[in-house]
Amino acid sequence: MKITQEMHTKLDTAKKNFQITSDSKQSFNQIVQSQAQQMKQKELTRLMENIDAQGERLLRHRSFRDLATFKRLVKSFLKEAVTNGLDLEKSHHFSYTGSSRQLAIIKEVDQKLLELTDEVLSEEQKGVDLLGMIGEIKGLLVNLYI
């Protein structure tokens, strides 16, 4: 069997096609990851907007139902942020004691939610105190969001 130039050309073309395919596969993965990150970011933004609106409702009405909805929204934001948005960031924010910064913020948000529940249930507190608590919780959530 005689090897001709035509055989070498076919082999070179096949190698080039394989390289193009692997490069396009890598860029496709990057595109998919980018789109997934954008979707996660939009979801966190939507949850934050819902928390803002519910916080305003809670401030106006001070009902147990509004409080429960506010707490549910905050917990869903925390769950979404921790499972999707912050898992890569945890390794960069360890304190000298070994605990991560996000964990401390989440515990603080939980504590503030308990305090907010106590304030809503007690009719003697002023609306300004309630607004301050809602503002603190939003601030902590913004720290997680950024």
Image (spheres, rainbow, N blue to C red):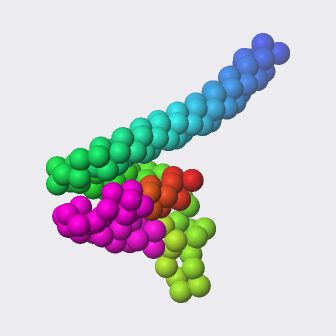
Position of residue 38 measured from the top left corner of the image (x, y, whole percent): 52, 36
Q: Which residues are magenta?
A: 104-133
Residue visible at 30% across and 70% down?
115
Residue visible at 17% across and 54% down?
64
User: Is residue 94 located in the magenta-colored stretch of the structure?
Assistant: no
Viewer can see residue 15: yes
Q: Nearer the viewer, residue 28 or 22?
A: 28
Q: Is residue 77 above or below residue 36?
A: below
Q: Residue furthest right?
A: 5
Quarter the N terminus occupies: top right
Viewer can see residue 110: no
Residue visible at 68% across and 23% down?
17
Q: Nearer the viewer, residue 19 or 101?
A: 101
Q: Nearer the viewer, residue 22 or 42?
A: 42
Q: Is residue 82 above or below residue 51?
A: below
User: Is residue 130 located in the magenta-colored stretch of the structure?
Assistant: yes
